[in-house]
């Protein structure tokens, strides 16, 4: 059996892993490389394998760095099933149609063919087969799978995979992205008792997040400080998961009168659509969220909250007197409506940019966190006088202690191979070193494009 790595190696985005058994060929995830724009060279380029040769795809969740090249895969001839949860299928439709729109506009501006179109998205979604958690399914003569709750976003999964070869069965586990419990709305990450081969993420392999209590305290302080100064609090947030998590906590703060009444804007058409999918799957919420919903508390609607879907509504936000809070895409400050608000508010010393998501090296968010006094926003140089801070605990990814704790119960069997992916090189290496030193496991950080016999 061979595993080859075609993304998310010594970097965070582009998850795409090929497994070749004696009888089957399949992918785990087919994500987009992300940075300054969608159509980076690595997304445009060839996969490194023939999409037509694949039997099926296992999709861990609907973040674009895990599903973003599925339409390209189908466009190039893949016609097998894509196994995922029902929320992942619905979220993927929303996320990929939005990606197709951005990709088309980029291609138009650069006078070239787009990476894929709406019809390719629709083809990919038509191939999705929704499966429940914790139920085994045979997907090939020599392969059976089980989805477990990764606790990362609603519907996210890690895969247990059993492959029969040479008269014996071996177990592979692909972590996808692991959650950062306790988190609002979603269930905590499940554990697994063993694996022969483990492929695991390491996004925050070199970090330890603040506690959940501290993150709420820091968010509350940021809002109260903005109110006191009469400023604007900008929170760039991923449309899927991060926006809904922040809304959950804002709902609690508003209804319990922990913050003054102020306008709170969700300025992201994509986040609005994703929130509608959240409302469809309340049965998958954690016990606390279900109890609130059953008691009549709409987690995504509270006094002062305004959803701004249209460009005209968005432009009116900056004519609304401060203090106010703006949640806008994108979480990495690359695209989305956040750029418009940054240009308007970064020069204002009363304003505050609160970053709650991982920021890529060289990206606008990383520059701001590192203290840049001026930055380019949508091609325009903007002076930075606003306060810039970050809260790491809002990450939907497990930090280093939680990653190591997730591997600890894997004893039946203990992993003979551990591949550490989906992290910047230093973070991945820290997890690999921790697994080797603390758990005595054979852990390596793979190279992109390389195959490993296991």
Image: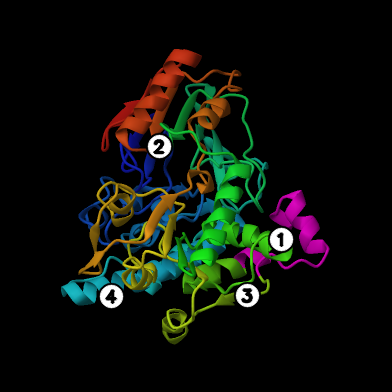
245 sits left or right of 327 in the view: right
Left or right: 287, with 201 as reference point: right
- Mark seen at residue 304: 3
Residue under label 1, please give it: 282
Secondary structure category for the residue under label 2: strand
Front residue of 121/440: it is: 440
**Residue 82 in picture, x, y percent from top left:** 49, 54
Residue at mark 2: 19
Question: Farthest residue in the left direction?
Answer: 111
Q: Please say whether residue 50 is one of the residues in the magenta stretch.
A: no
Q: Nearer the viewer, residue 273 or 113?
A: 273
Q: Is residue 35 left or right of residue 399?
A: left
- Image point 62% across, 51% down: which residue? 131
Of 140 and 258, the residue lying toward us: 258
Of the residues under marks 1 and 3, which one precedes in the sequence? 1
Q: Position of residue 48 (x, y in %)?
A: 25, 45
The region drawn magenta spans 277-300
């Amino acid at each position: 059996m061979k595993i080859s790595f075609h993304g998310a190696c010594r970097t965070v985005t582009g998850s795409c892993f090929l497994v070749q058994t004696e009888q089957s060929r399949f992918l785990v995830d087919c994500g987009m490389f992300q940075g300054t724009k969608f159509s980076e060279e690595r997304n445009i380029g060839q996969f490194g394998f023939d999409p037509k040769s694949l039997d099926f795809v296992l999709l861990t969740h609907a973040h674009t760095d895990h599903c973003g090249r599925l339409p390209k895969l189908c466009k190039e001839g893949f016609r097998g099933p894509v196994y995922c949860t029902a929320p992942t299928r619905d979220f993927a439709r929303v996320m990929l149609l939005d990606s197709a729109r951005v990709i088309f506009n980029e291609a138009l501006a650069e006078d070239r063919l787009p990476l894929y179109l709406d019809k390719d998205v629709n083809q990919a979604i038509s191939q999705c087969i929704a499966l429940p958690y914790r139920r085994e399914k045979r997907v090939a003569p020599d392969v059976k799978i089980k989805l477990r709750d990764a606790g990362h976003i609603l519907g996210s999964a890690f895969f247990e995979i059993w492959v029969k070869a040479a008269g014996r069965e071996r177990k592979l586990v692909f972590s996808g992205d692991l959650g950062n419990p306790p988190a609002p709305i979603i269930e905590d990450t499940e554990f697994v008792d063993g694996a022969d081969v483990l492929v695991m993420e390491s996004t925050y392999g070199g970090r330890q997040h603040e506690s959940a209590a501290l993150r709420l305290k820091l968010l509350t302080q940021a809002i109260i400080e903005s109110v006191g100064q009469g400023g604007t609090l900008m929170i760039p947030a991923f449309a899927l998961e991060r926006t809904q998590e922040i809304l959950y906590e804002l709902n609690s703060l508003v209804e319990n009168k922990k913050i003054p009444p102020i306008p709170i804007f969700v300025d992201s058409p994509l986040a609005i659509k994703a929130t509608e999918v959240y409302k469809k799957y309340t049965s998958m919420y954690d016990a606390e969220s279900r109890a609130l919903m059953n008691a009549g508390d709409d987690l995504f609607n509270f006094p002062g909250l305004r959803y701004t879907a249209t460009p005209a509504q968005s432009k009116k936000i900056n004519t609304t007197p401060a203090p106010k809070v703006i949640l806008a895409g994108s979480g990495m400050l690359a695209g989305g409506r956040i750029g418009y608000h940054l240009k308007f508010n970064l020069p204002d010393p009363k304003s505050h940019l609160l970053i709650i998501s991982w920021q890529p090296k060289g990206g606008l968010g990383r520059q701001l966190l590192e203290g840049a006094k001026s930055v380019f926003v949508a091609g325009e140089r903007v002076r930075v006088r606003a306060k810039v801070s970050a809260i790491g605990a809002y990450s939907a990814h497990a930090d280093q202690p939680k990653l190591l704790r997730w591997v600890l119960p894997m004893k039946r069997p203990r992993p003979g191979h551990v591949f550490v992916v989906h992290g910047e090189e230093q973070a991945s290496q820290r997890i690999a070193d921790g697994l080797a030193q603390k758990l005595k496991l054979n852990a390596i950080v793979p190279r992109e494009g390389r195959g490993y016999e296991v």
